[in-house]
Amino acid sequence: MTATEVTTPAAPEDGAPLVVFEAVTKRFPGIVANDSVDLTLEAGEIHALIGENGAGKSTLMRVLYGMYPPDGGRILVKGQEVKVSSPRVAISLGIGMVHQHFVLVDRFTVTENIILGAEGGPVLDVGDAEHKIAELAESYGFAIDPHRRIEELSVGQQQRVEILKALYRGVDLLILDEPTAVLTPSEAGELFDNLRKLRGDGKTIVFISHKLDEVLEIADRITVLRRGRVVGATRPQESSKNKLAEMMVGRPVLFQLDKPEVQVGEPVLKVEEVGLGNHLNGVSLEVRAGEILGVAGVEGNGQRELAETLIGLRTPDSGRFSLAGEDVTGLSVARLRKLGVGFVPEDRHHRGLVLDMTLWENSVLGRQSETEYSSRGGVLAIRKIKELASRLVEAFDVRARGITVPAATLSGGNQQKLILARELDDEPVLLIAHQPTRGLDVGAIEFVWRQLLDQKAAGRSVLLISAELDEIYELSDRILTIYEGRISGEYPSDAPPEEVGVGMTGGRAEAGAGATVTEL
Amino acid sequence: MATAVSGAPKRSRSSRLELIGGQILAFVGAALFAGVIGGIIIVLYGENPLFVYATVLNYATARPEDIAQVAENATPLIFSGLAVAVAFKAGMFNIGVEGQYIIGMLTAAIAALYLDRLPGVLLVPAVVLSAVLGAAAWAAIPAILKVKTGAHEVVTTIMMNGIAISLVAWAILNPLKSTGEQSVDLRTNLFPGKALMPSLAEPLGLPSSVHLTLLFPIALLACALVWFFLYRTRLGYEVRAVGSSSGSAEAGGISIGAAQIKVFLISGVLAGFVGLNHLLGDKGYLGNNYEVGLGFAGIAVAFLGRNHPVGIALSALLIGVLIRGEDGIALSTELPTEVLIILQGVLILSVVVAYELVRRTVARRQLREEAVVEAAAPAEA
């Protein structure tokens, strides 16, 4: 399974590599996103590009895909220097890219989406396109019905549509940006099978990721970026997870944090048969003092609704939930916060911070009514709030130019630290943490995890809702799986991941072709 | 680690100064641009732009009474600009300031006509209170409709404007119709003198043709109060949070609906003042020839002033200068006064574009400096 064993029809006659980056530099104001990067992509290989967030992986590939013009260096495709001025040019050169966030029209069918932008004339020949797409899907073993609408497909299937979109345009090189971020373990497995088939057919694949296990499994060659520079290149058989992590971060990384031993106490949160529209369907669970309960599941299975219900943003249609024995169903966010519930939202920009406001204004959000921070007459105690902000910023090492800059100017990791600092500062009895490390780099993830473990060590509770199994395993004392708004399984923290993966797909080993899974 | 923070406030204050300085620069640049465009139009009319602009400036500033005239022009615009701005801070577009101030004039007229037994010291406040309550009540309807039913405030306030105009027309034709026989205009009876707004013309030694009243200093006070409300009170904080990110505000325990209703009422209160200078400082009755469009002008003023109370006061004064300049143009040149309206339009458009350019530049620089701060001290757990 090495790159060398592959000889492909896509290889150019003169034997030049498929793509060569020579000293490619891309600057954004004040940041060098790619600093004189040299990289060679051989035809017919799966080349993993790894690095922390902000290391420049996606930027480099977007330069190749014509989304950003490079500021320096040159790109050669099949030995010819090229100027990729737009994605259209990239596609004509045989380069396709599947973005992390899909760009599909929900109400269009698979076929309509695939031909969108490549209609080939004012009159659509949908029948012909459909035929071609079905053939293409067949040849790579993609189980996709070209007549289905996108909104009826699972995330894994939508991703296949995106890949087909590129293949339909005849690309030889396929760039996948964090393709497994939205997939279950079994869907990821299917993706890998598909990628191997594509490689067998001579296609070249660039696989952008920060999940090291996957990279070691699928890649032929691995290039590591750090702060815009190539810091190493290796092959899976010559490397290990720890070695890769050290290259990425620039220092040794612990993958195993010590879980503090805590005497688990009384139930703090008790959720009984909570239902909410189509989203939640009789969810019951219990979190005890000094416990981290992990709720694992593929995104979009009711996690957001569950988290938002428990912090009071939504009112359940049925069922009840209680906090330390007291029924709190239907209470407002303000009341629940007063009772000691903290909330780390999955979407820090739309549920966590007011980006236009300053750090000090954000650091009091949720506590602005406390008598310490505003008088009974409703006048803000600005000095006190600024003291609070300084304390939070210092305790959680939020890197900013001061507390009077807008929250929008912080990096994702620092924004998340600010939210955590705020939510943990008044020692909540229960912290609802939804995807607390989304989009963070390894260093910041470690920091967030430690904070959650500290919360538990102090005898308080955490409800951790995450689609990242690693994270669930790293922190949880017990694991629940959620699927289509139901709790589909409960597992001890040492259950094998495959078993939990089964729960994440509703109790069946295969995700199925988007069909609703039978009742448990 | 803490070094990243300590010593930083000073630098960020300078970046705020930079933003304010940039905005002033943007304004001047945009004004020059508008002047050039206006100049081209004036040249096409065969006049000398420099002479025209000098005329405008001369008419607006030459004598104390000209300056007073500008202040008089600015008075209603400050109130309507503030009314638009506070709603905008909560993410709402109050297109209904127009209807709200018209209703405010109606309720003020009713108070002035029917509470005439009160002494002046009580009557004037009662008339003002009546205007404010009327306007706020008119604002409450779309606010409640929005929060309870989701009806968009832009649509409902526009409808309410139409209703307000018709209601006033009906009122001065029927129950409030003047009882005097010679009146040509359709209007109410004259208000008692003690119901009128105390004039500043006489104390300042200005001719009585200037209708500068106590409302001008009240308007400036309102700017200060609105600033305090937005940036120093809890409700103002919540309102701004709702306006910039309703989702995060909600997750922070802020009731979006309550904040929106409250701020719309405040907007209505401010709208209540808009028509008062015209009603109580100038006319002394409510007629069918009352001044219209002040509410819509407020949208432009709020835009020009970046929804900030100080900016609103300044831009209202600027518009006041242009309005005064129209008289000069009519008297000293052959130009149609609409030239100044075109100038206003170009000014507003170019200022909006220029502000946006400055905002992006400064934001980009901030982001850049932020990246430097982070890079200087790599993240450690």
Image (cartoon, rainbow, N blue to C red):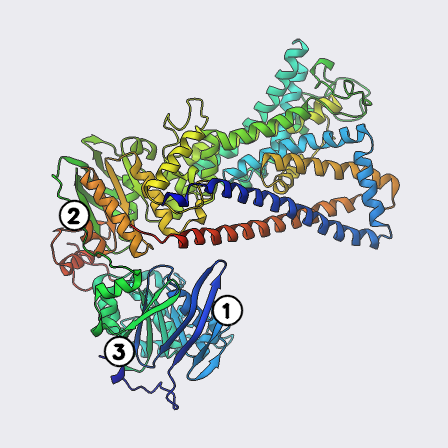
Q: Residues within 10 Å of mark 1 (few under 14, many from 20)?
A: some
**Residue indicated by mark 3:** A197
Residue B146 pos. (x, y %): 47, 37
Residue drawn at the location 36% of the way across and 32% of the way down = A367
Mark 1: which secondary structure? Answer: loop
- In the image, is residue B82 above or below residue A516? above
Q: Amino acid at mark 2?
A: Lys
- Residue A240 in which image quadrant: bottom left
Between residues B154 and A335, which one lies in front from this camera angle? A335
> Which is more N-terminal, label 3 or label 2?
3
Q: Name the side, left or right, on which B275 lies relative to A447.
A: right
> Which is more N-terminal, label 1 or label 2?
1
Residue B259 pos. (x, y %): 45, 33
Residue drawn at the location 80% of the way across and 39% of the way down = B57
**Residue indicated by mark 1:** A71
**Residue indicated by mark 2:** A259
The answer to whether residue B345 is seen in the rendering is yes
- In the image, is residue A474 above or below residue A510? above
Quadrant placement of the C terminus of chain A: bottom left
